[in-house]
Image (spheres, helix red, strand yellow):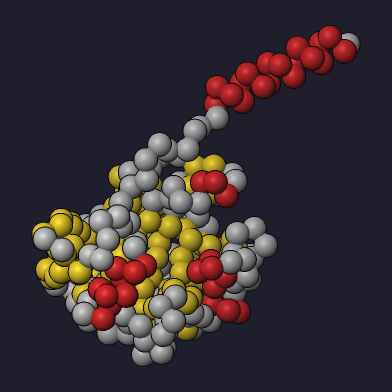
């Protein structure tokens, strides 16, 4: 009996190994920002190209250079703005490159009213609400909602806005947090309010829009999938803004369909 148990265990291990999926080797760039740098004399010449329809803050990776960079007023690039500037180099060694963040700092959005992110006439259950135990317990996800859309169901824009981030090339999912950064998603910027909305776990090649597109509320933007960190097909949805500390701050949503996001619990059904 013990021998048979060991054999069965080995077979199950082999089957699991054959069916397990490795994390992708490369992360897909969701936010195209043109950046280049070169040394001319005693200066580092930086060329910036914000190709997005939203403001972008640029932060140099070298902290000492960044202080001079910000003193020149190069903190935020406006939508579609291109800029070239020089920063004095006191030393030959420096950390190259830059990071950037979407949005401009605001105290609070002008409005928090959005539509449910799926087709009119459809209804779905809430899988996980605010501050959920599984994955809604930190960062932006603390005020996110998970709707039980199935693979292939249509995801719609929650308000008028621009597509400023898009990934739809991932194929697989995993049941632990190491898969968190490998979900397909779309980010919309809503200039009338200063809000961003994000739609996550989309289907591979399921996007119906492209970065730079203007979309209207209720317009189909993607197909739901099962990618990234998840145990079941669903749409992860969150709204946030860039606060005055330059941090992404999620908000509670006052849905146009007369639901308040903070009151929705797992098992509740919402209809558009």
The quadrant the C terminus occupies is bottom left
The quadrant the N terminus occupies is top right
Q: Which residue lies most toward the right here?
A: 1
Report the side of 138 relative to 184 (left or right): right
Q: In the picture shown, does residue 124 fall above or below 256?
A: above
> What is the x, y in percent for residue 86?
15, 69
> What is the x, y in percent for residue 13?
67, 22
Closer to the camera in the image, 57 or 22: 57
Report the side of 72 relative to 143 (left or right): left
Who's the residue at 30% across and 55% down the image? 93
Q: In the picture shown, does residue 147 fall above or below 227?
A: below
* Residue 17, picture quadrant: top right
Query: Total label count?
Result: 0
* Residue 30, picture quadrant: bottom left
Report the side of 246 relative to 192 (left or right): right
> What is the x, y in percent for residue 157?
33, 68
Judge whether residue 219 can be spotted in this image: no
Closer to the camera in the image, 242 or 169: 242
Q: Which residue lies most toward the front here?
A: 91
Who's the residue at 63% across and 18% down the image? 14
Closer to the camera in the image, 117 or 238: 238
Judge whether residue 105 can be spotted in this image: yes
Who's the residue at 67% across and 62% down the image? 133
Closer to the camera in the image, 161 or 88: 88
Who's the residue at 21% across and 80% down the image? 72
């Amino acid at each position: 009996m013990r021998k048979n148990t060991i054999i069965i265990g080995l077979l199950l291990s082999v089957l699991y190994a054959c069916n397990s999926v490795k994390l992708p080797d490369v992360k897909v760039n969701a936010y195209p920002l043109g950046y280049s740098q070169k040394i001319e004399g005693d200066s580092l010449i930086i060329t910036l190209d914000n190709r997005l329809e939203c403001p972008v803050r640029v932060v140099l990776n070298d902290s000492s250079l960044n202080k001079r960079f910000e003193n020149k007023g190069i903190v935020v690039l406006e939508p579609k703005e291109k800029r070239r500037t020089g920063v004095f180099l006191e030393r030959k060694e420096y950390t190259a490159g830059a990071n950037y963040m979407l949005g401009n700092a605001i105290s609070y959005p002008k409005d928090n009213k959005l539509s449910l992110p799926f087709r009119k006439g459809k209804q779905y259950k809430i899988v996980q609400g605010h501050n959920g135990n599984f994955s809604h317990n930190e960062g932006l996800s603390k005020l996110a909602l998970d709707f039980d859309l199935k693979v292939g169901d249509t995801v719609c824009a929650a308000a008028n806005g621009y597509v400023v981030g898009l990934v739809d090339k991932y194929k697989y999912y995993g049941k632990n947090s190491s898969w968190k950064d490998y979900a397909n998603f779309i980010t919309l910027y809503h200039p009338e309010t200063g809000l961003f909305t994000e739609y996550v776990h989309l289907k591979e090649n399921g996007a119906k829009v492209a970065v730079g597109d203007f979309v209207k509320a209720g317009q189909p933007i993607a197909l739901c999938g099962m990618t990234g960190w998840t145990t079941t097909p669903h749409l992860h949805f969150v709204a946030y803004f860039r606060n005055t500390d330059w941090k992404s701050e999620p908000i509670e949503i006052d849905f146009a369909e007369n639901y308040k996001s903070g009151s929705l619990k797992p098992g509740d059904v919402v209809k558009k």
